[in-house]
Image (tube, coloured by chain):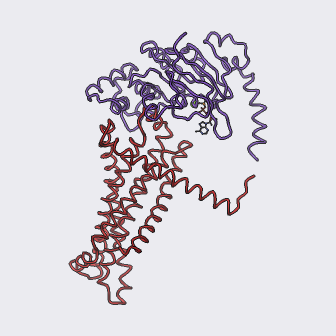
Amino acid sequence: MRRFSPVTVLGSFSVAVIEFLGSLGLLLKETSLMIQPALFTGRGKRLGWRNLWFQMVRVGVKSIGIVSLVVFCIGAILSLQMEPILRQYSATDKIADIIGVAMFRELGPLVAAITLTGFAGASIAAELGTMQVSEEIEALESQAISPVRFLVVPRVLATTVMMVCLAIVADLMGVLGGLFVSTSILGISAESYLRATFSAVEMKDFLGGLFKAAVFGCVLSLIACHLGMTVKGGAEGVGTATTKTVVYTIVALTFIDLGFTATFYYLGL
Amino acid sequence: MPDIAIKVSKATKIFGSRTVLDAIDLDIYRGETLVILGGSGSGKSTLLRMMIGSVPIDGGDILVHGKSLCDMSRTDLNEYRKSIGVLFQSGALYNSMTIADNVALPLREHTDLPEETIELMVKIKLELVGLREHATKLPSEISGGMKKRAGLARALALDPSILFYDEPSAGLDPVTSAEIDELIIKLNKLLGVTSVVVTHEMDSAFRIADRMVLLDRGKFVASGTPEQMKKSTDPLVRQFVYGLIDGPLTERKRTGAYESDLLMDNI
Ligand SMILES: Nc1ncnc2c1ncn2[C@@H]1O[C@H](COP(=O)(O)OP(=O)(O)O)[C@@H](O)[C@H]1O
Ligand SMILES: [Mg+2]
């Protein structure tokens, strides 16, 4: 007979969360130890760079279009939403400042990461999950080929690097979205919009955003790899792992972002 | 006294509260083909996975060429793994790579051989299993029997001294299955490898085995040459070997399973 009291539910939930974070930490540790043998020393480098390149194309190139479209629209939406409020204070010229800072510090990296979760995270989890189910990962191990070196390192590195590139694209597309609405509908000149953007956004906003993007990319690919490689229960398990990847990643990204923002706030950055 | 390649001594495996393998002993001699028989879920694959070092041993030990698997460091274990070949139940080919790349992977990962040499070696291995014309195909483009052959070619890539087969004839039609059996015999004779085959198909077992053991409820309940097994008077062996409907196996299912089903799982 099982009984569910609030305490047991909360307890087992906390244990599950800690277990999950622990295994992510272990995977991160093993991945960083394996970067060197995968790319620089040892025989693994024969295929290492090729695998990395392949993953970068797969993760990054195909998602540029969607990320651009989504962030462009968010830039446009923001400027339309803000205009009536700012007009009350005769401050419509501040639209560019707000969108610029919001994009570079926050929305560019976050929206790119969430889009990439659906795009690359889900597909990595499904791919590794299928490999787990079809004994491919076990076969690698049985041939003394480390799955972390061979599968996880290229995926995590590729996602982290491409996430930074995507964040740059997203920053620019967001500003363009705001620019498009401001010039075509709100009657602000392109020149004054861009000047306001560049004076409002500082280098530290840009670099801080990129650092966040790198962390997002690393976390989202680690979650996808971990959940993919630990799939149990056949094809159904692969489906569950894919869904879990998307949900867990979005929760994790939000918490990490909150942590970053709070830290930056208290440090006055 | 023949050489022992693998010595399983008091090896135990426990999943949750269930003892799947209960302190079993087994000697596998160098160069022989040993068949491990047992019903579905009797722990055959688990035993094989323990022997290749991918499932931890919960008690006892397994010695390969005199070295304990429990005491091996990661480096030692990897060296051991390079000296064995495994054919998995589903073939387990890397689906994103061509057949040739599948076979080449261990060579690319573990040797400094130039690409031309690797290509040559891949051709030799594929010829050995009769797949040379299909080198550039993807696993999804070939039949089940061919997948097993390709998996075998990959297992042979590093010239192993021991070959492990998990249900080599599972999911194959009788003719293809017989062809795979021929291949197992051929490789055993030609390369002088030790072969460990897990199966529940009696036809296949009798064709390839030098010696067989029967696994049941975590223990080896019988062992011997194919002739000895055929002549056995033990009701359990007879039921398994001849596929009889009446016998201890079905008897057990009729009584025990129902009770435990009723009593255990609803607590
Ligand atoms: N990783 C695992 N976790 C829990 N139980 C397992 C695991 N692997 C196998 N088992 C259980 O061990 C038993 C033996 O499995 P297996 O070795 O695959 O049997 P066989 O290959 O003889 O059909 C089965 O009851 C199976 O459910
Ligand atoms: Mg099995």
Rendering coords of residue A255 (x, y %): 47, 65
- Res A48 quadrant in image: top left
Rendering coords of residue B145 (x, y %): 46, 25
- At 35% from the left and 90% from the top, the residue drawn is A89
| Chain appearing in red on the rendered image | A
- In the rendered picture, chain B carries what hue? purple
Judged from this view, the residue extending furthest toward the left is A191
Location of the N terminus of chain B (image quadrant): top right
Rendering coords of residue A143 (x, y %): 43, 31
Classify the position of ligand 1 by quadrant: top left, top right, bottom left or bottom right.
Answer: top right
Rendering coords of residue A236 (x, y %): 55, 46
- Res A51 quadrant in image: top left
Q: Residue A269 versus residue A216: which sits nearer the camera?
A: A269
Give the answer, above or below, for where B260 lies relative to B158: below
- At 65% from the left and 32% from the top, the residue drawn is B20
The mark tally for this picture is 0
Name the side, left or right, on which A38 lies relative to A142: left
Q: Residue B86 versus residue A44: which sits nearer the camera?
A: A44
- At 76% from the left and 26% from the top, the residue drawn is B251
Q: Residue A116 versus residue B224: which sits nearer the camera?
A: B224
Give the answer, above or below, for where B19 lies relative to B234: below
Give the answer, above or below, for where B141 lies relative to B161: below
Q: Residue B56 versus residue B265: which sits nearer the camera?
A: B56
